[in-house]
Amino acid sequence: MTSKRPRAHTFTDLLDEMAGRHRHREAIIWRGQRLDWAGWRERSAALAGFLQRHGVERGDRVAILLPNRPEWLISVMAALRIGAIAVPISTFSSPRELAWTLAHCDPAALVLAPAFGDRDWLAALRRAERVPDCLVSVDNSPVGTPWDRALAGEPATGPGPGPGDTCFILYTSGSTADPKGVTLLHRDVIANGFDIGERQHLTADDRLWCAIPLFWSFGAANALPAVMSHGGTLVLQERFDPGSAIRLIREEGCTVFYGMVNMVRAMRDHPGWSAEAFVSMRTGLTIGLARDVTFMVETLSAPQLCTVYGSTETCGNCAVSDALDPLDLRLATQGLPLPGMQIRAVDPRTRAPLPNGTVGELAVRGHVTPGYFRAPELTARAFDADGWFLTGDLGLVGNDGRVRFRGRIRELIKTGGINVSPLEVETVLIQHPDVREAHVIGLADPDRDEIVAAVVEPEPGRTVDPTVLRTWCRELLAAYKVPATIRLAQGADLPRTATGKIHKPGLPALFDAAEAQP
């Protein structure tokens, strides 16, 4: 079944359109709270008015430091309503990472909770050099304007964003030491998100279980526009917990799964597991080996689970299998390119297009980022002369037009579905006074795809305790970036090329099977 494509080409118009179509249908569910489409629109317009009165203008950045909860969605739509750019910040961020992100995006306003998990955001803000004057806080934070007061004034006035305006800056790890700010445009995210929903055959009756962080592109540029453009419901979980997930999916009758195999394994192994909890589940998006996808389909009772290929730069996904494709086809490929997307394999050295069926670097054109925020040199390197985005991934396009992912050219580590830059982790490791050199790689792991592993050479005459070093990393890095295993080695023991450089493909041999476990 094909849904009616929205008329809207911006998030603001999309929210208005859906509020008109589905005024009192549930749009957001969180901790028993239920917000309909009309309420979402009204609250975001009220917060937009507050931001407007406090000097936030078109093109300004509004940073959002919140977990999955209604305030995140309201804040994003408020920023976009006045033509500002939403900058979701990872709640995994360490104080150092938060300070860097705020300095880089230079926001005119920040919406935040005082803390989340083991992160004290107020303490972290005191260490940051760049904190905007306009702060909106939830959960009785002692700083800024309380949430209820910020929503108490008149709604915003004036023109909203245009289709070609930037809606998001999404920070993602890559091949550089610092994260990259991927810019995305309203028209691209809306159009691509609708087509992602079409591949899942979403309708207004669907309810998407959302425990993946909304600040990921998987959330902000994928789940959000896919559900919004079909008038469905987002069922939010602040952070993944298997027992809570089982209860939430059962109680709310969730039909759409967004997640990875490690989440499904955790639910299956939980004492509260019940197959009956998933009788409503039907479709969703995931990545993984064929055995992992098969396990998820069977465990979730989700016969129409879709496989995908893409990146933040390609609005979350550029290829998605169809929910009605035979399972064998969904296991073997990542589906056809989405409408408006072109995908081809090119020679990694010459960039010349390769024939169908030939493995090369995947390149994408269509609904892709116009570039990285405040990084023109990175933008220039990311595209070829004809405007194709160079993904750094190996794959092929078959004679049937379907994409088949074969691995990563670059050294980017993907652990539990999250990207980790080896260079960023290495930069932190070598800051320790006892560390001379550090080399970070990904090791294959049955549960998380890869784990972060480090080979460390101590300074001469120094002793390095891997446990102490991991504690050091936890202070400076998000938890998922901390090496799960650290191998100590002397420089002479490290594999090297003929020119004396470290040969990273030889590093896994330094880890035995036992050490490769988290």
Image (tube, grey):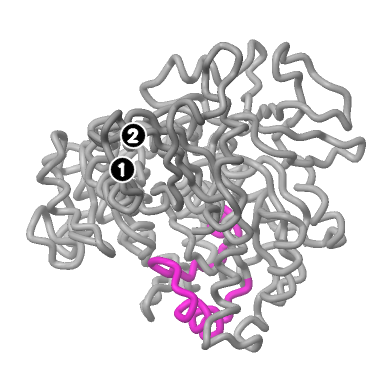
Q: Which residue corresponds to the image point at 86% horizontal and 59% vertical from the top-left? A: 328
Residue 228 within the magenta-colored segment of the rendering? yes
Q: Could you tell which of marks 2 and 1 lies nearer the N-terminus?
A: 2
From where the camera sits, is residue 162 visible?
Answer: no
Instruction: Give the x, y percent position of residue 348.
Output: 70, 19
Please rate how many residues cluster around mark 1, counting C-alpha atoms within 10 Å: few if below 14, some from 14 to 19, many from 20.
Answer: some
Q: Which residue corresponds to the image point at 23% horizontal and 34% vertical from the top-left? A: 433
Asked which secondary structure carries label 2, the reply is strand
Q: In which quarter of the image is residue 292?
A: bottom right
In the rendered image, the vertical position of residue 260 relative to residue 488, given as above or below: below
Q: Which residue corresponds to the image point at 25% horizontal and 62% vertical from the top-left? A: 118
Which residue is farthest front? 461
In the rendered image, the vertical position of residue 380 relative to residue 251, given as above or below: above
Q: Are marks 2 and 1 in contact (CB under 8 Å)?
A: yes
Which stretch is magenta? Answer: 226-255
Horizontal side of residue 365 vs 417, given as left or right: right
Which residue is farthest left? 142
Relative to the observer, which residue lies in front, 387 or 117? 117
> Which amino acid does the dot numbered 1 rest on?
Val
Q: In which quarter of the image is residue 152?
A: bottom left
Instruction: Give the x, y percent position of residue 280.
Output: 65, 80
Instruction: Give the x, y percent position of residue 220.
Output: 47, 50
Relative to the observer, which residue lies in front, 7 or 333? 333
Q: Cα distance, mark 2 to mark 1?
A: 6 Å
Which mark is on residue 458? 2
Residue on which the image places disc 1: 464
> Which amino acid does the dot numbered 2 rest on?
Pro
